[in-house]
Image (cartoon, helix red, strand yellow):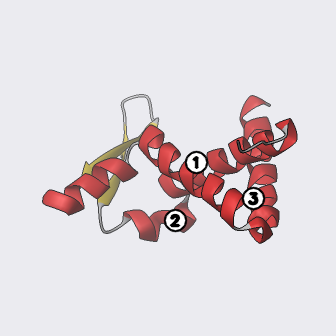
Amino acid sequence: MFEISWIHLVILVLASFRLTHFIVFDELASFIRAPFLTTIYQEDADGQMSQQIEIKGTGLRRWIGKLLSCYWCVGIWSSALVVVLYWFFPASFIFLVILAVAGAAAVIETKI
């Protein structure tokens, strides 16, 4: 059976969190979402900005748009990618550690 240390598990969890957040929310990854989603920002009566997401197209394009607009859905695929990288490509571990550190920083930032 595949064994994993607790620290490697924490690294994988944080790397998966950061990769998911990058794909679903970060502006740098908007080119991934652009063919499938349109994001509209609207100001409400209180002056707060709210985000509306419109899914483009039909068929496969619409399905991918639904997938990319779902944090939980992208999280599953991101987790799978992180585990595959860890398991089959040991040299990718440094990349996973970088994602994990960025993920930990994001968690700390939201809690402060």
Q: Nearest the camera: 108 or 82?
A: 82
Q: What secondary structure is found at the residue carrying circle 3? A: helix
Q: Nearer the viewer, mark 1 or mark 2?
A: 1
Q: Is residue 96 visible?
A: yes
Q: Which residue is drawn at 46% across and 38% down?
A: 72
Pointer 2: residues within 10 angstroms few (<14), some, or many (20+)? Answer: few
Q: Is residue 57 visible?
A: no
Q: Give the total of numbered labels.
A: 3
Q: In the rendered structure, which amino acid carries the disc numbered 2? A: Ala
Give the residue at mark 1. 79
Instruction: Indicate which disc residue 19 carries.
Output: none
Q: Quadrant of residue 52?
A: top left
Q: Nearest the camera: 92 or 100?
A: 92
State the separation of the CA atoms marked 1 and 2: 17 Å
Q: In the rendered structure, which amino acid carries the disc numbered 3? A: Leu
Q: What secondary structure is found at the residue carrying circle 1? A: helix
Q: What secondary structure is found at the residue carrying circle 2? A: helix
Image position, residue 86 (x, y; %): 71, 58
Give the residue at mark 3. 96
State the separation of the CA atoms marked 2 and 3: 18 Å
Q: Residue at x 84, y 36 (%)?
A: 6
Image position, residue 10 (x, y; %): 78, 39
Q: Which of marks 3 and 1 is nearer the N terminus?
A: 1
Q: Which of marks 2 and 3 is nearer the N terminus?
A: 2
Give the residue at mark 2. 29
In the picture shown, does residue 30 fall above or below 105?
below
Q: In the rendered structure, which amino acid carries the disc numbered 1? A: Ser
Q: Is 38 left or right of 84, judged from the image as shown? A: left
